[in-house]
Image (cartoon, grey):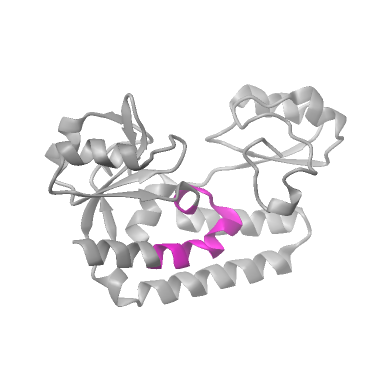
Amino acid sequence: MTKFCVHPHEWFKTKTRIGGTKKIHIDQIKALSPTLVIANKEENIKEQVEDLEAFTNVHLTDVSTYEDALNMIEEIGLLTHTSEKAKELILTIKERFAELSKLSQIQQLQSLPCAYLIWQDPFMTIGGDTYISDLLKKIGFVNVFANDNRYPSITLSNIEQSNCKVIFLSSEPYPFKQMHIDELQRYFPNKLIILVDGEMFSWYGSRLLEAPAYFKSLGQMVSDQL
């Protein structure tokens, strides 16, 4: 587990930490004698994956959409001989998102333009080819920077020119707080600015079980304030 693997809570203090997603400790991993390492194309650099492949099997995930996330669960189920659990998980996720799409507060948000910020100094947002952007679309929002790729740097002027109605400030990777809302509100007095849980938007896998309930409350909040 990396230092960012904080769920489930009961595991947090009992599992071996092997660094962060960008700086893993190869020797520590090798000492654990793993039969399978799950890596990610976006988080782990090529050289790290090649070093791991020298002594174990590596499954490289690449998730850019909601469907990719479901496919990843299925693939890991096959690799770990837990296909039935994976199928149950996928079915539950699909059911919860289907229920979410029927809610009036979500339907009212259709095509609402938004900007989703993940960093400050410089400000950075998410392009249309990211998992976060796909989830935004799935719950009724339109990413105003969808024509960009990956995680472009932007300015306050770019945000203003985008004509977004809502600005989401993510809790990660940059830990936006209320003071950042207050600061941006001075620049954009007519835009709705909301802190959001970055885990719900960017942690795929089993986190998708909890995401629909969170998106329901977020949709209600946006509907009430616009």
Report if residue 202 lies within the magenta region. yes
User: Is 116 on the left or on the right of 79, as rendered?
Assistant: left
Q: Quick check: 19 above or below 201?
A: above
| One can see residue 122 in this view | yes
Which residue is found at the position 38% from the left and 53% from the top? 134
Q: Is residue 213 above or below residue 69?
A: below
- Give percent across and percent down for residue 159: 19, 37
State the image coordinates of residue 213 (x, y, percent, origin top left): 46, 67
Q: Which of these two is toward me, 114 or 49?
A: 114
Along the line of sight, which residue is nearer the eye, 59 or 24?
Answer: 24
Segment tinted magenta in the rendering = 200-216
Asked if residue 27 lies left or right of residue 119, the reply is right
Report if residue 127 is visible in the image: no
Q: Which residue is at 56% across, 57% downward?
A: 207
Could you say where residue 132 lies in the image, as x and y percent from the top left? 41, 48
Q: Which image quarter is the C terminus in?
A: bottom left
Q: Is residue 98 left or right of 191 when viewed as pictured?
A: right
**Count of numbered marks:** 0
Q: Is residue 150 magenta?
A: no
Chief secondary structure of the magenta portion: helix
Residue 121 sits in which quadrant?
top left
Q: Position of residue 17 (x, y in %)?
A: 74, 34
Q: Quarter of the image holding residue 28?
A: top right
